[in-house]
Amino acid sequence: MTMSRIPMLDDRSLLSAAERLRPDLAPEYVLIRAAWSVLVEPGDGIAGALIAEHGAQDALRTALGEPGLLAPGRIGAREIADAQSRWQPRARPQAVHDALDSAFHVGARLLLPGDDDWPAGLEDLGAHAPIALWMRGDATRMRGQETVAIVGARAATSYGESVAGELAGDLAATDAVVISGGAYGIDGAAHRAALGVGGTTIAFLAGGVDRAYPIGHQQLFDRIRDGGAVLSEVPCGAAPTKWRFLQRNRLIAATGMATVVVEAGWRSGSLNTAGHAAALGRPIGAVPGPVTSAASAGCHRLLREYDAVCVTSAQEVRELWGSVIEAPPTAIPPDPDRTRLLDALSSRTARPPEDLARRSGLATDRVRALLGILELEGAVRRGESGWTQTSR
């Protein structure tokens, strides 16, 4: 069967917009992926399977109405027909042009599978992996780094925000990339803490990267773009919807090597993120809270019903994916004899070893030995009539 040429690929205006956005790639390839981003809703498994089977260009012909392509054993004719009825109302060249043009004007980039900055974990989503991602910021700092998703309730308590900040800050300070969803509450606390220590943080949005949602996080998103990236499956101008929030969660879970839920209600959307992580085989951590707190009910549910691991520190979070940062050397506990001798010394009155032995309850030989060590450290001074302490 001879495939016809896709008219969109002969549109010089569209090709020019694609080339302007990604001059490093063939404009037809960029245009095809951008078109798919406009046509489908996030997580469309029919589109993903069709592209995996036939490639993005031939699959696009089917999306635009040309018959003949199936994914044997995966997609039947009826499913293709249903999908076409969803896609074709959006098949407007102007919508694709607007997506490319809007991205260029806000400084966004179309990130594509195979790019060096493409989050590797997304491939585990299979047919439900994103076809493309729109990005503002710099994701190069994520290359080769450990990644962790930290999520939780929007209506977080001060306890939850404090714990989220501590975990995210400690992890980011040791080069882990903190992934979250840019929402109020736990998400925001995690992003801010990572930025506060000069670390890298990534926010996945449910709407276009050209709009701040929630609007109160406009300045936070500006900071995230300086210290990481803001990404979305939907093009600029697209509004966040309930479905897009739920699908956004799968990207957060797939990009993180582990997902940590800090606070969550019994039916919190954060449990949806944890569910995606579990389906992908990613470890899940949950932070415990007061048993009387409704904001922690979801975390306790994860611990009780979903084999989540109780985590209370950044080190315990790292253990979820088998990473261990060597703890600083434990301080040597003070020598009790040394402490007793220092208590017996005076900074004003010189005392001979025999007097110090009586005052401290130590043997005279032990006192003399300790005085020699303390003198080397500069803690004591020897005079004609005995020893004095130089500082306390």
Image: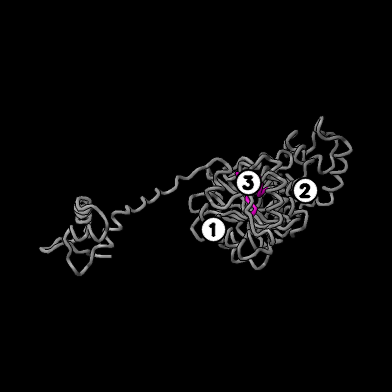
Q: Residue at x 32, y 52 (%)?
A: 335
Q: Is residue 161 positioned above or below 21 on the image?
A: below
The amino acid marked with disc number 2 is: Val
Look at the image and say whether residue 207 sits in the magenta stretch.
Answer: no
The amino acid marked with disc number 1 is: Glu
Q: Categorize mark 2 by other alpha carbons within 10 Å: few (<14), some (14-19), many (20+).
A: many
Q: Is residue 204 visible?
A: yes
Location of mark 3 (residue): 309
SS category of the residue bearing label 2: loop
Location of mark 1 (residue): 166
**Quarter in which the N terminus is drawn:** top right
Q: Residue at x 27, y 60 (%)?
A: 342
SS category of the residue bearing label 3: strand
**Quarter in which the C terminus is drawn:** bottom left
SS category of the residue bearing label 1: helix
Q: Categorize mark 1 by other alpha carbons within 10 Å: few (<14), some (14-19), many (20+).
A: some
Q: Is residue 284 left or right of residue 351?
A: right
The amino acid marked with disc number 3 is: Val
Give the residues drawn in magenta, as a range.
251-261
234 and 121: which one is in front? 121
Q: Categorize mark 3 by other alpha carbons within 10 Å: few (<14), some (14-19), many (20+).
A: many
Point out the tag, 3 or 2, that comes first from the N-terminus: 2
328 and 186: which one is in front? 328
Cα distance in 3D space between marks 1 and 3: 18 Å
Location of mark 2 (residue): 40
Q: Is residue 62 left or right of residue 257?
A: right
Residue 63, quarter of picture: top right
